[in-house]
Each structure stands twice: as structure tokens, then as C-alpha cells.
Image (cartoon, rainbow, N blue to C red):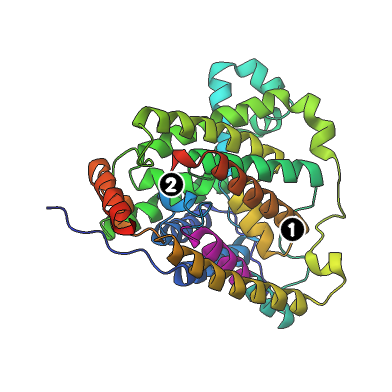
Amino acid sequence: MSIPFYDGGVAAGLLSGVLFGYALEAAGFGSPRKLTAQFSLRDFSVFKVMFTAVLVAAIGMYILRTMGLMAGNAVFIPTLFFWAILAGGLLIGAGFALGGYCPGTSVVGVASGRIDAVVFGVGMVLGTSAFAWVYEPLIGFYMAGQGPAAQTLPQLFGLPEWVVLLVLVILAAVGFRLGTMMERARGGPLTAAEVCAPDDEADDMTMTAATRQA
Amino acid sequence: MREAPKPFWSPLSAGIVLGLALLLTFVITGHGLGASGFVTRLAAQANDWVAPTATTENAYFGPFMKAGNPLMSWITWEVVGVLIGAFLGAKGAGRIAVKVERGPSTSGGSRLMYALIGGVLVGFGARLARGCTSGVGLSGGATLAVAGFVFLIGFFAAGFAVSFLMRRVWQ
């Protein structure tokens, strides 16, 4: 058996998408208040869910390769273009803090009935179009700081993959503990009842929370 | 009285299920999950409706248009799947809320303006980064790509900085 199957068909897309959407929604990522509460340190769900998912998939692929079921260069690994990827990350972080979503979570927002997510989507189409129209003068910056093709952390640091995975697991565990402490100190994390309430009720709940703290 | 929505999953459970979905996607397709790739194709299509000649000649959108219908792609079906999966989950758990979700001190109009500006920044940024939080951060991170971690450092740094400067938007 050789993995991956390189199946890019309709059914494969729908299956991946349904699981992706279901998990993001269950995590609470259709709510821009829950998502952005990461950055006020009241809700560490974004950090916790992302870090856990990255490690589960990374360890899963490590096991598949170790068992000889998957070749080392079998999956797509993005190549670093330092300046454009750093700038893109900064812009997405800024836009997420301001607009409440990233591209994937905005789709979950739309599916959960959030009107602001639809407007965010219109903004993304405008921003993407703006990029396309200034792409030519930007090409120099877009290509600057190119790293080795498909470079990974084990290659960068010259360490075995299991050591890198172990360090990341330890970092995640520390992050989970610190995150939970900070959440508790700030009255978080946000619950489904809080973020799904109609606007007037949401205001009432915030008032109640404020009174409780005072 | 509305029925109370079911609680969200714990971040650990949601993270494990998301990680398994990501692993399955790598096994089936050879690449990870994404989202902004669909937005790029949607933008190419939208520009084609407004200005077909200029869009086909555009250095960035041109290749998408010349390859046929830009929306006919794996990523379109994946995003349709996300809509279906998220809707079924939200519906089943009583978590559909049709509203403009906003911070207590932000008006509905301002919230929509921030959503639009945020969307523009994210759309532009995702093209620079050659992907978004899903494609480069999550999927790139899972392959332990250096690119994925550079992206995540930028994402969290700017998120904290802008959130601190604009904290009235959400609190």
C-alpha cells in the first residue's frame, strides 16, 4: 500500500471539508468573540486547538513514515520565502484581531449564521483582488529571502525529527498550563451560551460578568 | 424560551479531532487543509465578471483563468464541505445564531466596518504568505515546515499587538 493516495476529487474534498468544518465549529471557532479572546488572553482555544492538531497530524505522519507506509517527501511542504510569509502572517494576525476571523473560520462563521462573517468574506475577496493588481511591482518582495526548498525544522536545526516533536509536545504542555491559568484569571474561556446569545442578552451577560468581578 | 446551546468541545478534544481530520487529508490527497485558496479562485472569478480581458491578462489571476473555470478545484469542494460540516454541527448543538457578533462597546455598524477592513488585510496577507492560517500555519506546521512556523510567529505577534491597540473593539 502506498500513502498518500493523491486523490483530489470531489468526494475527497467534501469529506475533508465536512470533518474540518465540524471540528472547527465544535471548538467554538464560528464565534469571532471566542477567536479574538485569544489575544486578550481570556480564551486560549485558538492556541490549544491549533497546537494539538498540528502535533496529532505531525506525529501521525512521523509514525506512517517510520513504519515505511509513507515516503519522506510524499506530502506537500511549503518553502520559506521569509519576508513575504512573515509579512503575510503579520497581516493575517492583524486582520484576524480586527475582523474576528481567518479565512477558514470565516466560513464556519457564515455557516453558524454570523452576518459579520459574510462581510469579512467580501473584504477578503477585495484584499485578494488588490494583491493581484499590485502583484507585478511586488514580485521582488514576494520572492525575497527564499529558503531551501521544503525545509523542515529537523533540517534547519540538524536534529532528529522525534527530538523536534518532543520539544514541541513539551512547549504545548507548558502553553496549555499557562493558558488555563490566564483564562481563569480573566473569567474565560467563553462558553457557547455567551457567544450564541442574541445581542441584547450578550450585553446583559457581559454586565453580569462585570458586576460579578466588581 | 430558546433552548440553551450545547457547550463547545474541550480544546484538547477538538484539537485531536481536527488533527485526525488533517492527517486523513494528508493521507488521501498528499496535502493539507486550506481556505484562502478558494478565496483566490473566487476573487479571480469575480474580477472576470467585472473586467474579463484585464483579469485574463493579469499576472496573478491570468494563470487561474487560462486553466479553465477557476472554481473547479479540490479546494472549492473542501470549502463547501466546511460549510456543510460546520452547519450540521452548529444546527445539531443549537449553536446557530443569526446576528452581527460584536464586543459590548462596539456598534453593529462599526463591527461590520472592522470586519470588512480585517477581511481586506487577511485577503491581501494570505496571498503574500501563499496561504492562510489553515494552509500555511496548520498544514505547514504539521509537516514541520520552517515556513509554517515563521507564519505562526508573525500571526500571533501581530494578533497580540493589534488586539492590544484596538482592545475596545472586542472588550
Give whichever of discs 2 and 1 has the lower sequence position: 2
User: In the rendered structure, which segment of residues is drawn in magenta?
Assistant: A42-57
Rendered position, B120 above or below A89: above
Pick the front one: A105 or A11: A105
Residue at the extreme front: A214
- Horizontal side of residue A62 vs B119, given as left or right: right
The residue nearer to you, when weighing A108 against B60, is A108
Residue displayed at 62% across by 60% down: B29
Q: Residues within 10 Å of mark 2 (few under 14, many from 20)?
A: many
- As measured in the structure, the alpha-carbon distance from the residue carrying label 2 to the one carrying label 1 is 29 Å
Q: Where is mark 1, residue-wise?
A: A77
B132 part of magenta stretch: no
Amino acid, disc 1: Ile
The circle on residue A31 is none
- The residue carrying mark 2 is A32
Left or right: A35 as drawn, with respect to A50: left
For the residues carrying marks 2 and 1, which lies nearer the camera in this image? Answer: 2
What residue do we see at 29% from left, 58% from top?
Answer: A212
Tell me residue B128's x, y (percent): 71, 38
- View extreme (bottom): residue: A67
Magenta stretch mostly in which secondary structure?
helix
Q: Residue at x 39, y 56 (%)?
A: B85
Give the chain letter at badge 1. Answer: A
- Residue A214: x percent and y percent? 33, 55
Residue A135 horizontal/vertical position (percent): 74, 28
Labels 2 and 1 touching (C-beta < 8 A): no
